[in-house]
Image: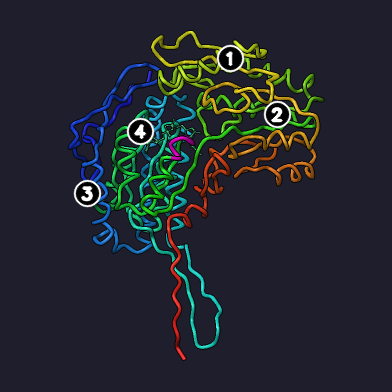
Amino acid sequence: MISATLPDHITGLLVDGEWTTPQSGQWLDIIAPAEGQPFGRIAGAGRADVDAAVASARRALSADWGRLNAAERGRLLSRAGLIVQERAEELAELEARDTGKPIAQARADITACARYFEYYGGAADKVHGDTIPVQNGYFAATENVPHGVTAHVIPWNYPAQMFPRSIGPALAMGNAVVMKPAEDACATTLVLADILREVGFPAGSVNMVTGLGAEAGAALSEHPDINFISFIGSSETGVAIQTAAAKTHIGCTLELGGKSAQIVFADADPALVIPTVVAAITQHAGQTCSAGSRLLIERAAMKTLLPQIVEAFSKVRVIMPHMEGQLGPVISSRQKTRVERYIQIADETGLPLLASGQMDPGLSPDGYFIQPRMYGPVPRDHRLAIEEVFGPVLAVIPFDDEADAITLANASDYGLVAGIWTSDSARALRVGRQMQVGQVFVNCFGAGGGIELPFGGMKKSGHGREKGWEALREFAAVRTILVRHD
Ligand code: NAD
């Protein structure tokens, strides 16, 4: 069993560089999804707490934080990356307990977390403006200006990755940040914020307001003194965030849900495709925005590749976080009920069950475990083919030919990522360039490790880009300066 907990000195909210208790007087339990039991508490911030955090960030911009140059900001971020590497095991254990994911996945998340700090630390002093040739007698240049106070609202599925992914580029560009992590899992984000404090981020540059979405999240996104919102979460909450941003005339990036297609042609390499399509829907119990939840398979491969995928899926093991296996529980009893409802719909509508995963006998009876399921063929208009389940449920949908595959893949309200599996490289490119998504993977899949790769959606999956260099552009406005010198 994993027994990691929050350090005692992290007593609630981070405001003005100090841990404080909430003015609201509210506290929320931290529940371990694999145990179904609380193992600590977080503050439930109210409007007054959010006001204090935003005011703290505003002050930081004209105090020590605002006076640092880009290289100094980058050095602080890089230093944080080193500390995360040094404390990797402690952070991984806390992440595994708090989210329920296998410790191996949590370790990979912490490695990615350190990489985000390293990447944005290195980038901070390399974001240049341009000079622009104009008529004689004038000099024109652009510079990148931080927005000011940026608000960051993130989900519970990968908190240790989302924290640096969201605030790393914002801090690199010189913004002061206020983060509202998810109430269902945010323990590691608090320890990470504490690491930023320890490495010397000046008071007020990084503020943390934990709490409920409808209270702390809404108070932050509607706050009149924030200048930008970076949101990662559901498409429904994305509408509330964008509405709030519109009311205060500020910009936002929205990284939302997905119903991503894995397009498997009959000439795909079985050694590559089989383990990856199974992992793409079972990783973190299917609670990954870029989960490959639709397996589109060429009819010609239904008797060759599909049985092998079914066999691999049947071997997937649901485990406790300290064990070796593919997936743990879902995040909460609410999420369990939600996913089980989809399974009920699949069963009631007579969808053929192709495979189900194995449950380890050592699972805690109070954990939120779900047996993974693979259904097919799923009719194209079935809810399982259309809606984001956010659980370990795979819908197999056959297609006739290349044109049919493209139509089917794009016939989704979402547009986050797509995977294409074929040994015909011309076809891979032809199909890939027609995908209405933000990322296309050919003979590989997964957004997880790609710190350097711009990531984001089209359609109901959102707009704006995180990760890579693109994210830095989102956290600054371009100011153009024209000087007459004749
Ligand atoms: P959610 O939208 O319910 O919650 C996300 C965050 O928003 C949480 O911190 C929550 O407290 C906050 N929130 C909720 N209501 C709010 C409101 N009215 N105002 C302001 N903040 C509010 O989503 P979730 O269920 O926690 O996460 C799952 C969803 O996130 C899935 O749809 C998944 O696909 C998506 N997701 C997307 C990405 C991506 O990068 N595209 C990454 C991870 C998760």
Q: Point out the image quarter for the N terminus.
A: top left
Which residue is at 68% across, 16% downward? 311
Q: Disc 2 vs disc 4: which is toward the camera?
A: 2
Task: Work out whether mark 3 precedes mark 4 in sequence or the reverse, and give the earlier one.
Answer: 3
Asked if residue 213 is among those painted magenta in the image, a careful observer would answer no
Which residue is at 76% across, 28% downward? 399
Residue bearing the label numbered 1: 357
Whether residue 425 is situated above or below residue 348 in the rendered picture: below
Task: Work out whether mark 1 precedes mark 4 in sequence or the reverse, and give the earlier one.
Answer: 4
| Crowd rating for badge 1 (residues with CA inside 10 Å; few <14, some 14–19, many 20+) | many
Which stretch appears magenta?
234-239
List the single residue furthest toward the front: 247
The three-letter amino acid code for the residue at tag 2 is: Leu
Q: CA distance from mark 1 to mark 4?
A: 28 Å
The three-letter amino acid code for the residue at tag 1 is: Gly
Q: CA distance from mark 1 to mark 3?
A: 48 Å
Q: Is mark 4 within 8 Å of ligand 1?
A: yes
Residue bearing the label numbered 2: 296
Task: Work out whether mark 1 precedes mark 3 in sequence or the reverse, and give the earlier one.
Answer: 3
Residue bearing the label numbered 4: 186
Q: Main secondary structure of the magenta part?
A: helix
Q: Disc 2 vs disc 3: which is toward the camera?
A: 2
Which residue is at 41% across, 11% downward? 364
**Image mark for residue 16:** 3
Q: Position of residue 121 (x, y in %)?
A: 42, 54
* Badge 4 element: loop
Which residue is at 37% across, 26% downward? 98
Q: Quadrant of residue 33?
A: top left
Task: Work out whether mark 1 precedes mark 2 in sequence or the reverse, and give the earlier one.
Answer: 2
Q: Disc 1 vs disc 2: which is toward the camera?
A: 2
Whether residue 76 is situated above or below residue 240 in the rendered picture: below
